[in-house]
Image: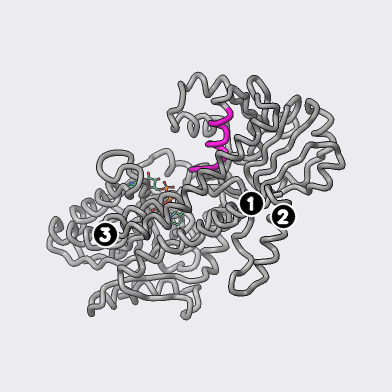
Amino acid sequence: MRITNVCCIGAGYVGGPTMAVIAQKCPHVKVTVVDLNADRIAKWNDPDVDNIPVYEPGLGEIVAHSRGKNLFFSTEVDNAIDEAQLIFISVNTPTKTYGSGKGMAADLKYIELCARQIARVSKGDKIVVEKSTLPVRTAEANKNILDNTGNGVQFQILSNPEFLAEGTAVEDLLSPDRVLIGGENTEEGKKAIQALVDIYANWVPKERILTTNLWSSELSKLTANAFLAQRVSSVNAISELCEKTGANVSEVANAIGMDSRIGNKFLKASVGFGGSCFQKDILNLVYISKSFGLQEVADYWEQVIIMNDHQKRRFSKNIVSTLYNTVADKKITFLGWAFKKDTNDTRESAAIYVADDLINEQANIAVYDPKVNYNQVLSDLDYLETRAAESNKKHTISFSDPYEACKNAHAIAVLTEWDEFKEYDWQRIYDAMLKPAFIFDGRNLLDAKKMNEIGFVFQAIGS
Ligand SMILES: NC(=O)c1ccc[n+]([C@@H]2O[C@H](COP(=O)([O-])OP(=O)(O)OC[C@H]3O[C@@H](n4cnc5c(N)ncnc54)[C@H](O)[C@@H]3O)[C@@H](O)[C@H]2O)c1
Protein backbone atom coordinates (compact mmCIF):
# COMPACT_ATOMS: atom_id res chain seq x y z
CA MET A 1 0.00 0.00 0.00
CA ARG A 2 1.43 3.42 -0.92
CA ILE A 3 0.74 5.88 1.85
CA THR A 4 -0.14 9.41 0.78
CA ASN A 5 -2.10 10.63 3.79
CA VAL A 6 -0.86 10.48 7.35
CA CYS A 7 -2.22 11.89 10.57
CA CYS A 8 -0.55 12.22 13.97
CA ILE A 9 -2.54 12.55 17.17
CA GLY A 10 -0.52 14.64 19.63
CA ALA A 11 1.38 17.80 18.63
CA GLY A 12 3.94 17.68 21.43
CA TYR A 13 7.72 17.33 21.64
CA VAL A 14 7.57 14.11 19.62
CA GLY A 15 4.58 14.52 17.30
CA GLY A 16 5.52 18.02 16.09
CA PRO A 17 9.19 17.50 15.16
CA THR A 18 8.69 13.93 13.88
CA MET A 19 5.90 14.88 11.53
CA ALA A 20 7.70 18.02 10.33
CA VAL A 21 10.61 15.83 9.23
CA ILE A 22 8.34 13.24 7.58
CA ALA A 23 6.59 16.05 5.68
CA GLN A 24 9.88 17.51 4.52
CA LYS A 25 11.29 14.17 3.39
CA CYS A 26 8.06 12.87 1.83
CA PRO A 27 6.60 15.71 -0.24
CA HIS A 28 4.09 13.24 -1.75
CA VAL A 29 2.55 12.57 1.69
CA LYS A 30 0.00 14.90 3.28
CA VAL A 31 0.78 15.07 7.01
CA THR A 32 -1.77 16.45 9.48
CA VAL A 33 -0.83 16.86 13.14
CA VAL A 34 -3.82 17.16 15.45
CA ASP A 35 -4.18 17.99 19.12
CA LEU A 36 -6.99 18.77 21.56
CA ASN A 37 -4.95 21.66 22.88
CA ALA A 38 -6.08 24.57 20.70
CA ASP A 39 -3.46 26.91 22.13
CA ARG A 40 -0.67 24.53 21.16
CA ILE A 41 -2.03 24.15 17.63
CA ALA A 42 -2.32 27.93 17.28
CA LYS A 43 1.35 28.24 18.22
CA TRP A 44 2.34 25.61 15.64
CA ASN A 45 0.47 27.72 13.09
CA ASP A 46 2.04 31.02 14.18
CA PRO A 47 3.40 32.74 11.05
CA ASP A 48 6.59 33.52 12.98
CA VAL A 49 8.31 30.14 13.44
CA ASP A 50 10.17 31.52 16.47
CA ASN A 51 6.85 31.14 18.31
CA ILE A 52 6.22 27.43 17.69
CA PRO A 53 5.67 25.68 21.02
CA VAL A 54 8.70 23.38 20.90
CA TYR A 55 12.18 24.89 20.86
CA GLU A 56 14.68 22.70 19.00
CA PRO A 57 17.65 23.92 16.96
CA GLY A 58 16.70 23.84 13.25
CA LEU A 59 13.04 22.97 13.81
CA GLY A 60 11.64 26.37 12.79
CA GLU A 61 13.19 26.09 9.31
CA ILE A 62 11.85 22.58 8.80
CA VAL A 63 8.34 23.59 9.82
CA ALA A 64 8.49 26.68 7.58
CA HIS A 65 9.58 24.50 4.66
CA SER A 66 6.44 22.33 4.57
CA ARG A 67 3.73 24.08 6.59
CA GLY A 68 0.71 24.91 4.45
CA LYS A 69 2.06 22.72 1.63
CA ASN A 70 1.93 19.14 2.90
CA LEU A 71 2.20 19.78 6.65
CA PHE A 72 -0.86 20.93 8.59
CA PHE A 73 -1.59 21.53 12.28
CA SER A 74 -5.23 21.31 13.29
CA THR A 75 -7.68 20.67 16.12
CA GLU A 76 -10.05 18.76 13.84
CA VAL A 77 -9.11 15.31 15.04
CA ASP A 78 -12.05 13.36 13.53
CA ASN A 79 -11.48 14.81 10.09
CA ALA A 80 -7.79 14.00 10.09
CA ILE A 81 -8.40 10.42 11.27
CA ASP A 82 -11.06 9.90 8.64
CA GLU A 83 -8.80 11.08 5.79
CA ALA A 84 -5.61 9.26 6.86
CA GLN A 85 -4.45 5.82 5.77
CA LEU A 86 -1.92 5.70 8.57
CA ILE A 87 -2.33 7.25 12.04
CA PHE A 88 0.51 7.87 14.47
CA ILE A 89 -0.52 8.03 18.13
CA SER A 90 1.93 10.38 19.83
CA VAL A 91 0.06 11.45 22.93
CA ASN A 92 1.53 11.70 26.41
CA THR A 93 1.83 8.62 28.62
CA PRO A 94 2.66 10.08 32.03
CA THR A 95 3.09 8.16 35.26
CA LYS A 96 -0.28 7.38 36.86
CA THR A 97 -1.19 9.73 39.69
CA TYR A 98 -4.19 7.77 41.00
CA GLY A 99 -5.51 4.29 41.67
CA SER A 100 -3.64 1.04 41.26
CA GLY A 101 -0.09 1.50 40.00
CA LYS A 102 -0.12 5.12 41.22
CA GLY A 103 3.36 6.66 40.97
CA MET A 104 4.69 3.82 38.79
CA ALA A 105 2.50 2.52 35.98
CA ALA A 106 2.00 4.46 32.76
CA ASP A 107 -1.32 6.24 32.57
CA LEU A 108 -2.83 4.91 29.36
CA LYS A 109 -6.06 6.88 29.43
CA TYR A 110 -4.97 9.19 26.60
CA ILE A 111 -3.93 6.23 24.46
CA GLU A 112 -7.20 4.43 25.03
CA LEU A 113 -9.18 7.56 24.18
CA CYS A 114 -7.30 7.77 20.89
CA ALA A 115 -7.98 4.11 20.08
CA ARG A 116 -11.70 4.58 20.79
CA GLN A 117 -11.83 7.73 18.71
CA ILE A 118 -10.07 6.04 15.78
CA ALA A 119 -12.48 3.09 16.03
CA ARG A 120 -15.51 5.38 16.08
CA VAL A 121 -14.45 7.62 13.20
CA SER A 122 -12.84 5.18 10.76
CA LYS A 123 -14.87 4.19 7.72
CA GLY A 124 -12.02 2.42 5.92
CA ASP A 125 -9.05 0.16 6.81
CA LYS A 126 -6.21 1.89 8.64
CA ILE A 127 -2.74 1.34 9.99
CA VAL A 128 -2.41 2.58 13.58
CA VAL A 129 1.14 3.28 14.72
CA GLU A 130 2.10 3.54 18.39
CA LYS A 131 4.68 6.33 18.47
CA SER A 132 4.21 7.03 22.19
CA THR A 133 6.32 5.01 24.62
CA LEU A 134 4.11 2.23 25.96
CA PRO A 135 4.26 -0.71 28.32
CA VAL A 136 4.98 -3.99 26.59
CA ARG A 137 1.78 -5.62 25.28
CA THR A 138 -0.20 -2.37 24.98
CA ALA A 139 -0.74 -3.12 21.29
CA GLU A 140 -2.89 -6.06 22.37
CA ALA A 141 -5.24 -3.77 24.29
CA ASN A 142 -5.34 -1.27 21.44
CA LYS A 143 -6.20 -4.01 18.97
CA ASN A 144 -8.99 -5.27 21.18
CA ILE A 145 -10.54 -1.83 21.41
CA LEU A 146 -10.19 -1.13 17.69
CA ASP A 147 -11.55 -4.52 16.60
CA ASN A 148 -14.44 -4.62 19.05
CA THR A 149 -15.67 -1.05 18.97
CA GLY A 150 -14.97 -0.18 15.33
CA ASN A 151 -17.23 -0.12 12.31
CA GLY A 152 -16.07 -3.49 11.03
CA VAL A 153 -13.04 -2.07 9.21
CA GLN A 154 -9.59 -3.67 9.46
CA PHE A 155 -6.87 -2.19 11.68
CA GLN A 156 -3.21 -3.11 11.66
CA ILE A 157 -1.25 -2.05 14.73
CA LEU A 158 2.42 -1.20 14.54
CA SER A 159 4.85 -0.14 17.24
CA ASN A 160 7.31 2.54 16.11
CA PRO A 161 8.87 4.03 19.25
CA GLU A 162 10.69 7.33 18.92
CA PHE A 163 14.33 7.54 19.96
CA LEU A 164 14.94 11.25 19.41
CA ALA A 165 16.57 13.19 22.23
CA GLU A 166 15.28 16.65 23.01
CA GLY A 167 17.85 19.32 22.15
CA THR A 168 19.04 17.32 19.15
CA ALA A 169 15.63 16.19 17.86
CA VAL A 170 16.06 17.45 14.30
CA GLU A 171 19.50 15.93 13.89
CA ASP A 172 18.29 12.65 15.43
CA LEU A 173 15.26 12.53 13.13
CA LEU A 174 17.22 13.38 9.99
CA SER A 175 19.84 10.72 10.61
CA PRO A 176 18.60 8.27 13.21
CA ASP A 177 20.86 5.51 14.58
CA ARG A 178 17.95 3.22 13.81
CA VAL A 179 14.22 3.23 13.17
CA LEU A 180 12.36 0.42 14.89
CA ILE A 181 9.10 -0.97 13.58
CA GLY A 182 7.25 -3.82 15.28
CA GLY A 183 4.25 -5.54 13.77
CA GLU A 184 2.31 -8.75 13.55
CA ASN A 185 3.80 -11.68 11.72
CA THR A 186 0.80 -12.15 9.40
CA GLU A 187 0.37 -11.28 5.71
CA GLU A 188 -1.54 -8.11 6.61
CA GLY A 189 0.91 -7.29 9.39
CA LYS A 190 3.87 -7.57 7.01
CA LYS A 191 2.16 -5.31 4.46
CA ALA A 192 1.57 -2.68 7.15
CA ILE A 193 5.21 -2.87 8.28
CA GLN A 194 6.32 -2.43 4.67
CA ALA A 195 4.08 0.61 4.22
CA LEU A 196 5.79 2.34 7.17
CA VAL A 197 9.25 1.15 6.09
CA ASP A 198 8.58 2.81 2.72
CA ILE A 199 7.94 6.15 4.41
CA TYR A 200 11.20 6.10 6.37
CA ALA A 201 13.14 4.73 3.39
CA ASN A 202 12.71 8.15 1.76
CA TRP A 203 15.68 9.31 3.83
CA VAL A 204 16.84 6.56 6.23
CA PRO A 205 19.26 3.92 4.86
CA LYS A 206 17.54 0.50 4.68
CA GLU A 207 20.01 -1.20 7.03
CA ARG A 208 19.00 1.24 9.78
CA ILE A 209 15.32 0.30 9.61
CA LEU A 210 14.78 -2.65 11.94
CA THR A 211 11.63 -4.71 11.96
CA THR A 212 10.66 -6.91 14.91
CA ASN A 213 7.61 -8.37 16.55
CA LEU A 214 5.35 -5.97 18.44
CA TRP A 215 6.48 -6.91 21.92
CA SER A 216 10.20 -6.60 21.19
CA SER A 217 9.62 -3.15 19.74
CA GLU A 218 7.57 -1.93 22.70
CA LEU A 219 10.07 -3.31 25.22
CA SER A 220 13.14 -2.02 23.33
CA LYS A 221 12.13 1.59 23.91
CA LEU A 222 11.74 1.13 27.68
CA THR A 223 15.02 -0.77 27.76
CA ALA A 224 16.92 1.88 25.80
CA ASN A 225 15.82 4.61 28.21
CA ALA A 226 16.58 2.43 31.23
CA PHE A 227 20.14 1.78 29.98
CA LEU A 228 20.75 5.46 29.24
CA ALA A 229 19.47 6.58 32.63
CA GLN A 230 21.45 3.83 34.30
CA ARG A 231 24.69 5.24 32.87
CA VAL A 232 23.89 8.64 34.36
CA SER A 233 23.13 7.16 37.77
CA SER A 234 26.25 4.98 37.59
CA VAL A 235 28.58 7.89 36.96
CA ASN A 236 26.71 10.00 39.52
CA ALA A 237 27.22 7.28 42.14
CA ILE A 238 30.94 7.40 41.40
CA SER A 239 30.89 11.22 41.63
CA GLU A 240 29.99 11.03 45.31
CA LEU A 241 32.83 8.61 45.92
CA CYS A 242 35.19 10.96 44.05
CA GLU A 243 34.27 13.82 46.36
CA LYS A 244 35.27 11.72 49.37
CA THR A 245 38.48 10.33 47.95
CA GLY A 246 40.15 13.12 45.99
CA ALA A 247 39.50 11.43 42.64
CA ASN A 248 37.99 13.60 39.93
CA VAL A 249 34.91 12.23 38.20
CA SER A 250 35.70 13.87 34.85
CA GLU A 251 39.11 12.19 34.83
CA VAL A 252 37.56 8.85 35.82
CA ALA A 253 34.87 9.19 33.13
CA ASN A 254 37.48 10.03 30.53
CA ALA A 255 39.62 7.06 31.51
CA ILE A 256 36.80 4.52 31.45
CA GLY A 257 35.17 6.05 28.37
CA MET A 258 38.22 5.25 26.26
CA ASP A 259 37.46 1.58 26.76
CA SER A 260 35.58 0.76 23.57
CA ARG A 261 33.37 -1.70 25.47
CA ILE A 262 32.16 1.15 27.69
CA GLY A 263 32.23 4.07 25.22
CA ASN A 264 32.48 7.74 26.10
CA LYS A 265 28.90 8.98 25.72
CA PHE A 266 26.51 9.68 28.58
CA LEU A 267 29.27 9.63 31.18
CA LYS A 268 29.04 13.19 32.45
CA ALA A 269 28.37 13.46 36.17
CA SER A 270 25.65 15.97 36.99
CA VAL A 271 22.97 17.02 39.44
CA GLY A 272 20.82 14.27 37.90
CA PHE A 273 18.79 13.45 34.84
CA GLY A 274 15.42 15.04 34.13
CA GLY A 275 13.05 15.14 31.21
CA SER A 276 9.68 13.59 30.72
CA CYS A 277 10.91 10.12 29.80
CA PHE A 278 13.70 8.51 31.80
CA GLN A 279 12.00 8.44 35.18
CA LYS A 280 8.55 7.53 33.90
CA ASP A 281 9.85 4.81 31.60
CA ILE A 282 11.96 3.19 34.30
CA LEU A 283 9.08 3.34 36.77
CA ASN A 284 6.98 1.69 34.12
CA LEU A 285 9.61 -1.04 33.66
CA VAL A 286 9.71 -1.54 37.42
CA TYR A 287 5.94 -1.80 37.55
CA ILE A 288 5.76 -4.31 34.71
CA SER A 289 8.51 -6.42 36.29
CA LYS A 290 6.68 -6.40 39.63
CA SER A 291 3.42 -7.33 37.96
CA PHE A 292 5.12 -10.45 36.58
CA GLY A 293 6.51 -11.23 40.06
CA LEU A 294 10.08 -10.34 39.07
CA GLN A 295 11.03 -8.53 42.28
CA GLU A 296 14.82 -8.62 41.75
CA VAL A 297 14.49 -7.20 38.26
CA ALA A 298 12.22 -4.46 39.58
CA ASP A 299 14.59 -3.62 42.47
CA TYR A 300 17.58 -3.50 40.13
CA TRP A 301 16.04 -0.84 37.88
CA GLU A 302 14.39 1.08 40.70
CA GLN A 303 17.84 1.78 42.11
CA VAL A 304 18.55 4.01 39.07
CA ILE A 305 15.75 6.34 40.20
CA ILE A 306 16.74 6.16 43.87
CA MET A 307 20.29 7.24 42.92
CA ASN A 308 18.97 10.08 40.78
CA ASP A 309 16.77 11.42 43.57
CA HIS A 310 19.70 11.16 45.96
CA GLN A 311 21.93 13.14 43.60
CA LYS A 312 19.45 16.04 43.36
CA ARG A 313 18.94 16.09 47.10
CA ARG A 314 22.60 15.99 47.99
CA PHE A 315 23.25 18.89 45.60
CA SER A 316 20.80 21.12 47.47
CA LYS A 317 21.99 19.89 50.86
CA ASN A 318 25.54 20.77 49.89
CA ILE A 319 24.49 24.30 48.95
CA VAL A 320 22.89 24.78 52.36
CA SER A 321 25.81 23.35 54.33
CA THR A 322 28.42 25.29 52.33
CA LEU A 323 26.53 28.55 52.81
CA TYR A 324 27.12 28.24 56.57
CA ASN A 325 24.07 26.04 57.15
CA THR A 326 21.56 28.73 56.32
CA VAL A 327 20.16 30.02 53.07
CA ALA A 328 17.20 31.83 54.60
CA ASP A 329 16.64 35.13 52.76
CA LYS A 330 19.77 34.56 50.66
CA LYS A 331 19.62 35.13 46.93
CA ILE A 332 20.67 32.05 45.02
CA THR A 333 20.79 32.41 41.26
CA PHE A 334 19.91 29.46 39.07
CA LEU A 335 21.55 29.50 35.68
CA GLY A 336 19.25 27.23 33.70
CA TRP A 337 15.85 25.75 34.43
CA ALA A 338 15.27 23.47 31.39
CA PHE A 339 16.15 19.83 31.95
CA LYS A 340 18.96 20.06 29.39
CA LYS A 341 20.38 22.56 26.94
CA ASP A 342 18.77 23.44 23.60
CA THR A 343 15.22 22.69 24.74
CA ASN A 344 12.47 24.69 26.45
CA ASP A 345 11.18 21.51 28.11
CA THR A 346 11.29 21.65 31.91
CA ARG A 347 9.49 18.41 32.76
CA GLU A 348 11.21 16.66 35.69
CA SER A 349 14.10 19.11 35.48
CA ALA A 350 16.54 18.77 38.39
CA ALA A 351 16.26 22.55 38.85
CA ILE A 352 12.68 22.18 40.08
CA TYR A 353 13.62 19.81 42.89
CA VAL A 354 16.71 21.75 43.93
CA ALA A 355 14.65 24.96 44.05
CA ASP A 356 11.96 23.19 46.06
CA ASP A 357 14.52 22.07 48.67
CA LEU A 358 16.05 25.52 48.89
CA ILE A 359 12.67 27.27 49.19
CA ASN A 360 11.93 24.91 52.08
CA GLU A 361 14.98 26.54 53.66
CA GLN A 362 13.48 29.96 52.84
CA ALA A 363 16.01 30.88 50.16
CA ASN A 364 15.12 33.32 47.39
CA ILE A 365 15.69 31.84 43.96
CA ALA A 366 16.52 34.04 40.95
CA VAL A 367 16.21 32.16 37.67
CA TYR A 368 17.73 32.87 34.31
CA ASP A 369 17.11 30.47 31.43
CA PRO A 370 17.34 31.58 27.80
CA LYS A 371 14.20 29.61 26.82
CA VAL A 372 12.07 29.33 29.95
CA ASN A 373 9.81 32.08 31.28
CA TYR A 374 8.66 32.92 34.81
CA ASN A 375 5.19 31.40 34.42
CA GLN A 376 6.75 28.06 33.58
CA VAL A 377 9.02 28.22 36.64
CA LEU A 378 6.04 28.95 38.88
CA SER A 379 3.85 26.29 37.32
CA ASP A 380 6.62 23.68 37.74
CA LEU A 381 6.94 24.53 41.44
CA ASP A 382 3.19 24.70 42.00
CA TYR A 383 2.83 21.26 40.38
CA LEU A 384 4.82 19.73 43.26
CA GLU A 385 2.17 20.99 45.69
CA THR A 386 4.79 21.48 48.41
CA ARG A 387 3.45 24.88 49.45
CA ALA A 388 0.94 27.56 48.50
CA ALA A 389 1.37 29.18 45.09
CA GLU A 390 1.74 32.57 46.82
CA SER A 391 4.76 31.29 48.68
CA ASN A 392 6.42 29.99 45.50
CA LYS A 393 5.87 33.41 43.99
CA LYS A 394 7.35 35.13 47.01
CA HIS A 395 10.52 33.05 46.88
CA THR A 396 11.23 33.09 43.13
CA ILE A 397 11.93 35.71 40.55
CA SER A 398 13.14 35.39 37.00
CA PHE A 399 15.33 37.61 34.85
CA SER A 400 15.82 37.99 31.14
CA ASP A 401 19.37 39.18 31.69
CA PRO A 402 21.86 36.81 33.36
CA TYR A 403 24.00 39.61 34.79
CA GLU A 404 20.98 41.13 36.52
CA ALA A 405 20.04 37.67 37.79
CA CYS A 406 23.46 37.25 39.44
CA LYS A 407 23.71 40.75 40.93
CA ASN A 408 23.94 40.68 44.76
CA ALA A 409 23.57 36.90 44.84
CA HIS A 410 25.24 34.85 47.55
CA ALA A 411 25.64 31.90 45.22
CA ILE A 412 25.08 30.66 41.69
CA ALA A 413 23.90 27.16 40.90
CA VAL A 414 24.37 25.91 37.33
CA LEU A 415 21.40 23.64 36.58
CA THR A 416 21.42 23.42 32.77
CA GLU A 417 24.46 23.11 30.49
CA TRP A 418 23.55 25.97 28.10
CA ASP A 419 26.64 26.80 26.01
CA GLU A 420 26.22 30.55 26.54
CA PHE A 421 27.06 30.21 30.25
CA LYS A 422 30.66 29.40 29.33
CA GLU A 423 30.99 32.66 27.40
CA TYR A 424 29.89 35.04 30.15
CA ASP A 425 32.09 37.79 31.55
CA TRP A 426 32.61 35.96 34.84
CA GLN A 427 34.76 38.69 36.32
CA ARG A 428 31.83 41.10 35.92
CA ILE A 429 29.50 38.59 37.55
CA TYR A 430 31.93 38.08 40.43
CA ASP A 431 32.31 41.81 41.03
CA ALA A 432 28.54 42.25 41.36
CA MET A 433 28.00 39.35 43.81
CA LEU A 434 28.13 39.28 47.60
CA LYS A 435 31.37 37.85 48.98
CA PRO A 436 32.43 35.16 49.36
CA ALA A 437 30.86 34.38 45.99
CA PHE A 438 29.99 30.72 45.51
CA ILE A 439 29.34 28.70 42.37
CA PHE A 440 27.83 25.21 42.53
CA ASP A 441 28.28 23.72 39.09
CA GLY A 442 25.70 20.97 38.76
CA ARG A 443 26.60 20.25 35.14
CA ASN A 444 30.40 20.24 35.23
CA LEU A 445 30.24 23.02 32.68
CA LEU A 446 32.55 25.79 33.83
CA ASP A 447 36.33 25.91 33.95
CA ALA A 448 37.24 25.33 37.62
CA LYS A 449 40.71 26.85 37.32
CA LYS A 450 39.42 30.05 35.76
CA MET A 451 36.65 30.40 38.35
CA ASN A 452 39.08 29.89 41.23
CA GLU A 453 41.46 32.46 39.76
CA ILE A 454 38.69 35.06 39.61
CA GLY A 455 38.03 34.44 43.30
CA PHE A 456 34.89 32.32 43.30
CA VAL A 457 34.50 29.52 45.81
CA PHE A 458 33.84 26.93 43.12
CA GLN A 459 32.43 23.45 43.54
CA ALA A 460 31.58 21.03 40.75
CA ILE A 461 29.91 17.64 41.09
CA GLY A 462 32.44 14.87 41.64
CA SER A 463 35.61 16.81 42.41
N1 LIG B 1 9.76 13.99 24.74
C1 LIG B 1 10.67 13.12 24.33
O1 LIG B 1 11.86 13.39 24.27
C2 LIG B 1 10.23 11.75 23.90
C3 LIG B 1 11.13 10.96 23.18
C4 LIG B 1 10.70 9.70 22.76
C5 LIG B 1 9.43 9.26 23.08
N2 LIG B 1 8.57 10.04 23.79
C6 LIG B 1 7.22 9.55 24.07
O2 LIG B 1 6.34 10.15 23.13
C7 LIG B 1 5.06 10.38 23.73
C8 LIG B 1 4.68 11.84 23.60
O3 LIG B 1 5.63 12.61 24.31
P1 LIG B 1 5.71 14.18 24.17
O4 LIG B 1 6.92 14.62 24.91
O5 LIG B 1 5.55 14.56 22.74
O6 LIG B 1 4.38 14.61 24.98
P2 LIG B 1 3.66 16.03 25.01
O7 LIG B 1 2.97 16.11 26.30
O8 LIG B 1 4.64 17.09 24.61
O9 LIG B 1 2.57 15.94 23.82
C9 LIG B 1 1.46 15.12 23.83
C10 LIG B 1 0.30 15.87 23.20
O10 LIG B 1 -0.78 14.95 23.03
C11 LIG B 1 -1.99 15.70 23.16
N3 LIG B 1 -3.11 14.78 23.41
C12 LIG B 1 -3.33 13.97 24.47
N4 LIG B 1 -4.45 13.25 24.29
C13 LIG B 1 -4.96 13.58 23.08
C14 LIG B 1 -6.10 13.18 22.34
N5 LIG B 1 -6.92 12.24 22.80
N6 LIG B 1 -6.31 13.75 21.15
C15 LIG B 1 -5.46 14.71 20.66
N7 LIG B 1 -4.37 15.12 21.32
C16 LIG B 1 -4.11 14.57 22.52
C17 LIG B 1 -1.71 16.63 24.31
O11 LIG B 1 -2.58 17.75 24.29
C18 LIG B 1 -0.24 17.02 24.03
O12 LIG B 1 -0.14 18.23 23.29
C19 LIG B 1 5.18 9.88 25.16
O13 LIG B 1 4.72 8.56 25.23
C20 LIG B 1 6.67 9.92 25.41
O14 LIG B 1 7.06 8.97 26.36
C21 LIG B 1 8.95 11.29 24.19
Residue located beneath label 1 in the image: 241
Q: Could you tell which of marks 1 and 3 lies nearer the N-terminus?
A: 1
Identified at 21% across, 52% down, the residue is 116
Q: Which portion, as a residue range, is magenta?
A: 347-358
The image's mark for residue 292 is 3
Q: Are marks 2 and 3 in contact (CB under 8 Å)?
A: no
| Disc 1 versus disc 3: nearer the observer | 1
Q: Quadrant of residue 42?
A: top left
Q: Nearer the viewer, residue 397 or 284?
A: 284
In the rendered image, residue 160, in percent from the top left (x then y), is placed at 37, 65
Q: Could you tell which of marks 2 and 3 lies nearer the N-terminus?
A: 2
- At mark 2, the secondary structure is loop
Specify whether tag 1 is near ligand 1 (CB below 8 Å).
Answer: no
Left or right for 84, reference 267: left
Could one spot residue 215 in this view of the protein? yes
Q: State the predominant SS element of the stretch in magenta.
A: helix
Q: Amino acid at mark 2?
A: Ala
Residue located beneath label 2 in the image: 247
CA distance separating discs 2 and 1: 8 Å
| Disc 2 versus disc 3: nearer the observer | 2
